[in-house]
Image: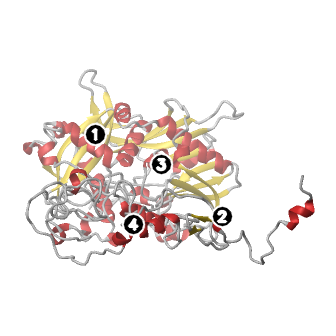
Amino acid sequence: MASLSDIIGSLPSQPTWGPPTTTETTLHGIPYAPFSKGDKLGRMADWTSDGKDGGDRGGRGGGRQQYNQRFRDQVYGAGQGLQTVFNLEGVAGMGGEEGSFSLVDRSQVSRGRGFGGGRGGVFSRGGRGARGGVQGQRGGRGGTFQRVDQRGGGRGGYNDRGGRGGARGGRRFGWKDWDKPQRNREASVQPKDSWRVLDEIDFSRLSKLNLDTGEGEDMDDYGFLYYYDRAYDKQPGAPTSAKKLQVLDRAAYNVTTSHDPIIQSMAEKDEATVFATDNILSMLMCAPRSLYSWDLVMIKEAGKIYIDKREGSSLDMVTVNENAAEPPLELSEGNKDTINSPGPLKEEATHINNVFPSQVVVESESSQHTMSNDHPFYNSAEETDPPASKAYRYRRFDLSLDADTEPLHLIVRTELDAVSKNNISGEDQFLVLKALNEFDSKAQGSGGALNWREKLATQRGAVVATEMKNNSCKLARWTTQAILAKADLMKLGFVSRAHPKSTTEHVILGVLGYKPREFAAQMNLNLNNGWAIVRTFVDLVMREEDGKYVMVKDPNKNLIRLYHVPRDTFEEEEDEGMGGLGGMEEGEEA
């Protein structure tokens, strides 16, 4: 056995690092490639590098070569500049001649048919799609990395933009592509530096919640209702059934939760812990379906929580095609059609829903359904217009859990719009009246909607299914409000523009009626999930001290942020608004 001194003595005496350059350190006379300290010693033989023909086994050299140059780690033996045995063998053979070859003739190919009638793909990867490339090329899996937007190969030159300028039958760049840029919408309210984030919850977590609250109980009711005009139910969509939408001046009110005198009196009597209106509560319960940004205000005071809204909130506006695959574009996104942008469409839809319920009822002082108490907001001494047909039901729901030591109740103010006689029993049925509006079936943002004038009478189911898809959040909110009010029927009016380019005149094409529970089942709407969402945010605020809190739906992400804000937040806006009893405002229906 050799001693340690013999091993040390056998080491080379040259000052250079590494083994000496002898015949033992070469492979068939070819020296090993030099390398530096920055090279990665990853592979002793790289079989994935480019071959001597400049491509891999399928002739698909273009994509592989670009991948190696841009994205692949430059390991030892894989770079193009290193003198590997693979590169040297390529130079010695035919690979050197092929590597020095370059195409200098870029003239347009002939329009002759030959094999150029095949349909090209986006990239010419061979098969049938590559038959229309260079004249005489039959495809295979080879070919260059090029755009083939034209239907027939060889028709027109290379043009990224496609269309008529580049190729006959070419498609527009970005049309129905999977990688469309995400829209950057603006938030409904901009958070300030004084706002403190308490929590943010994404919709995927909210969608898994479940809480059964039962049917609820009636606390009290106010107002009166006119009877619904059944003439609007005859032959929806028929030309003879169309009626012009008329503007009637009626006093309508939109009172927030904290300014409702009935809710204030119930809070003083300790009837419940949480208070809200159906318009506000439905937005929170249907939050996972929403895309546009919105915000709610939660006020905690003396152990009570009031779910409220700020002055001028977007909750009062009716959205249009919010859930469509391609919703209407904003003006800042290049939409030149001003009346079909989201803002004007919301105003148009809100105006229609303010006017529609007053037109489809028969106003008669002798035949009306009077609730237990008078209208809580109408004052005949101050108002000049007659009140609109409206009834308010205050209903209580139990949000308690088995682990709660004390019950947690919620009181919501719900609304009813009309009443109708049952055809069999003759009893009064309470109705909720809403209106869907059609702006232009050919405009951007229509969501593939059918022409109502042509299809409502013959393809009623397809029209309603399309509206469920394009307006999932809006219809879910309306259905939730009808169920909260314990309405027997929900009437949906189909209102279209008299002319697609004008928003001043509208036509009622017909009215369809649905039972709220059945309509919710068709939409896959789960109210137990909505109640669980409400309970989740109530628990978050209950853990905090008394004060004001704001929920903001992120405009570009599926999540809700909860902020703790100063007590005077939004009060300046409310002071500039209308005064009167609790800040009530008269709905403009002119």
CB atoms of marks 3 and 4 within 8 Å: no
Separation of disc 1 and disc 3 at Cα?
23 Å
The amino acid on which the numbered mark 3 sits, given as a three-letter code, is: Ala
Q: Which residue is mark 4?
A: 93
Classed neighbour count for the residue bearing mark 1: other residues with Cα under 10 Å, few (<14), some (14–19), many (≥20): many
Classed neighbour count for the residue bearing mark 4: other residues with Cα under 10 Å, few (<14), some (14–19), many (≥20): few
Q: Which residue is mark 1?
A: 491
| Label 1: element kind | strand
Camera-side residue of 287 and 108: 108
The amino acid on which the numbered mark 2 sits, given as a three-letter code, is: Glu
Mark nearer the N terminus (4 vs 2): 2
Separation of disc 3 and disc 2 at Cα?
74 Å
For the point 43% across and 51% down, the residue is: 290
- When the figure is inspected, residue 178 is found, relative to residue 84, above or below; the finding is above
The amino acid on which the numbered mark 4 sits, given as a three-letter code, is: Gly
Disc 1 versus disc 4: nearer the observer: 4
Q: Is residue 456 visible?
A: yes
| Label 2: element kind | helix
Separation of disc 1 and disc 4 at Cα?
82 Å
Q: Which residue is mark 2?
A: 24
Tell me if 483 is positioned left or right of 310 in this view. left
| Label 4: element kind | loop
Disc 3 versus disc 4: nearer the observer: 4
